[in-house]
Amino acid sequence: MKSKQVGILAFHGDVSEHIETSKHAAKNLQLDIKVIPVRIKNIIRHLDALIIPGGESTTLFKLCQREGMWEDMGKVKNIFGTCAGAIMLSKSVIHKIPDQKTLELMDIEIDRNAYGRQINSFEKDIDTSLGRIHAVFIRAPKILSVGTDVKILAENEGEIIACEQKKGNSYYLASCFHPELTSTVFHEYFLKKIYQN
Ligand code: GLN
């Protein structure tokens, strides 16, 4: 099977955790993927998939804008966004800063710092469609509503915290928490989707 190129947006946030977890997930599945840190525009069009790590969506927005990446990022076939990455994928953001842009690829409405400030961050075991995982919420957003094509993968106290959307040839996965810190399950799921898609 041909090796797939999986980019990790590598400006800031938990980049190295996503790189390691992606490599572990590929090893578990015996898939031969190439994990590529992405900081410049030219690489993007060669990617089969992109992971947008958590961090700070306003910073990610500014750096992607500075590097002129928007258009190419929007064309990547498979994208997985965690936390700030989920904000980047969403069509509509509550409490965004003036002029903050997102890729607007997933039909989700997301509230940026809905769980409160950094001090309100928490960890919790959660049942998801992919199994029970220990979920870490760091100044996490909440997904307030999703379009009819979006499948919910996990909820916390009735609130949506992970979902996916197949849109034409494209596939998008979003989580409000940080699966890369505690588990390979979400990365394995995403890698399988890349090979199916
Ligand atoms: N709430 C942050 C934002 O607006 C995201 C936090 C995170 O990625 N851990 O970008």
Image (spheres, helix red, strand yellow):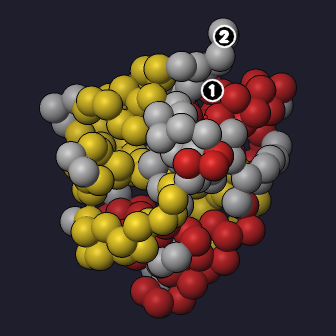
Quadrant of image for the C terminus: bottom left
Q: CA distance from mark 1 to mark 2?
A: 17 Å
Q: Quadrant of residue 109?
A: top left
**Residue 80 horizontal side relative to residue 154, left or right:** right
In the image, is the residue at mark 2 within 8 Å of ligand 1 by its beta carbon?
no
Picture coordinates of residue 160, whole percent (x, y): 29, 45
Question: Which residue is painted at 65% across and 35% down in the image?
Answer: 57
**Mark drawn on residue 71:** 1
How many other residues sit within 10 Å of disc 1, few (<14), some (14-19) or many (≥20)? few
Q: Residue furthest front?
A: 119
* Placement of 154 over or under 59, stated as above or below: below
Question: Which residue is painted at 54% across and 38% down in the image?
Answer: 116
**Mark drawn on residue 99:** 2
* Placement of 116 over or under 20, stated as above or below: above
Residue 22 appears in the picture as rendered: no
Kind of residue indicated by mark 2: Asp
Kind of residue indicated by mark 1: Glu
SS for dot 1: helix
**Residue 38 horizontal side relative to residue 175, left or right:** right
Mark nearer the viewer, 1 or 2: 2
Question: Which residue is painted at 36% across and 36% down in the image?
Answer: 143
